[in-house]
Amino acid sequence: MRAAMFYAPEDVRMEDVPTPEPGPGEVLVRIEAALTCGTDVKSYKRGHPTLFKTMPSPFGHEFAGEIEAVGERVGDWRPGMRVVAANSAPCNRCYYCKVGDQSMCEELEFLNGAFAEYIVVPSRIVDQNLFEIPDGVEFSRAALLEPLACAVHGVVRTPIELGDTVAVIGAGQIGLMFVRLATERGARVICVDKSLDRLAVARKLGAEETIEAADGVDTIAAVREWTLEGRGTDVVIEAVGLPALWEQALEMVRKGGEVTLFGGAPSGTSIQVDTLLLHYSQITIRGIFHHTPHTVQTAFDLLRSGRVDPEPFISGVRPLEDIVAALESHGRQEGIKYEIRP
């Protein structure tokens, strides 16, 4: 089969590799749609210590397709079924799984290799995070499962009440999903981003106000000006992953407010926190990583019901052979994400 293989930062090669065969409890999926995402772009640019453990490594993790073959002991799964899978599954045995923090699982099993013609889904993911796609749901919509599950995880862990004012920093795929989900919860949403095109999508998804983070614009003041008496928002969600924006988030939120840091910053970076601001303003800061089987299920239900429309998120369709060009376009913020069709 044809597959994209990661060798080193900015060195991804299309190669002919053996088509994998499913082992016990596993299923082989013929990929019909794969999607690029911000994690793919970051990994392409600088590598990834968790996702790329051996070199060369399969690449890509958002996909949907049709079961081609099944291994032994796979239960009700059979060839011909249209399916989508999340990109990981917890062990449900370690300390963190037992206390309910499954995204912190010490043995989290990841799945890579969506930028290819076929992929084998491991048995643990088959058992927990594989879903049959209903008739009428396109493969491209179903393939949004993993990023939406991450955004659902962030919203589930962040107290957002009906009528709250929420600032979302970043209008990439995850930021836009936060916009949609916060709106779904009844919040008034303001979105901040450098791209006017992406901010237009944020408005389409429910943002009441948008701010272009252009040179010379005081985004902190602009966000506060939009809130009652300039006190700041009830919640700020950072979905970019830049330490400077993490610090800005603390300046945008009101006293007693909530700051959720979802964007993954580069390794080795740090932020400065004004201890007086943190203490006397009683600000709550939380980091959110990845997803859980519960949020994957919730995301699947949102996609299946049509409450999250995939159209605003997918900016174009590219063949598998154009994966590097698609990642480069994504990295330049030319659109939101791209559908890759093997």
Image: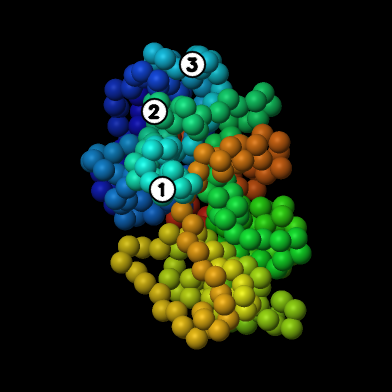
Q: Which mark is residue 96?
A: 1
Q: How is the image coloured?
A: rainbow
Residue 312: x percent and y percent?
65, 48
How packed mark 1 is, by other alpha carbons closer than 10 Å (few <14, some 14-19, many 20 or more), is some
**Residue 214 in sight in this render:** no
For mark 2, what is the residue? 122
How packed mark 3 is, by other alpha carbons closer than 10 Å (few <14, some 14-19, many 20 or more), is few
Q: Is residue 271 left or right of residue 283?
A: left
Q: Earlier in the sequence, mark 2 or mark 3?
A: 3
**Splitting the image into 4 quarters, where does residue 73 fall?**
top left
Describe the element under mark 3 as helix, strand or loop: loop
Give the residue drawn at x 58%, y 31%.
139
Please name the amino acid that badge 3 sits on: Gly
Please name the amino acid that badge 1 sits on: Tyr
Q: Which mark is residue 75?
A: 3
Q: Earlier in the sequence, mark 1 or mark 2?
A: 1
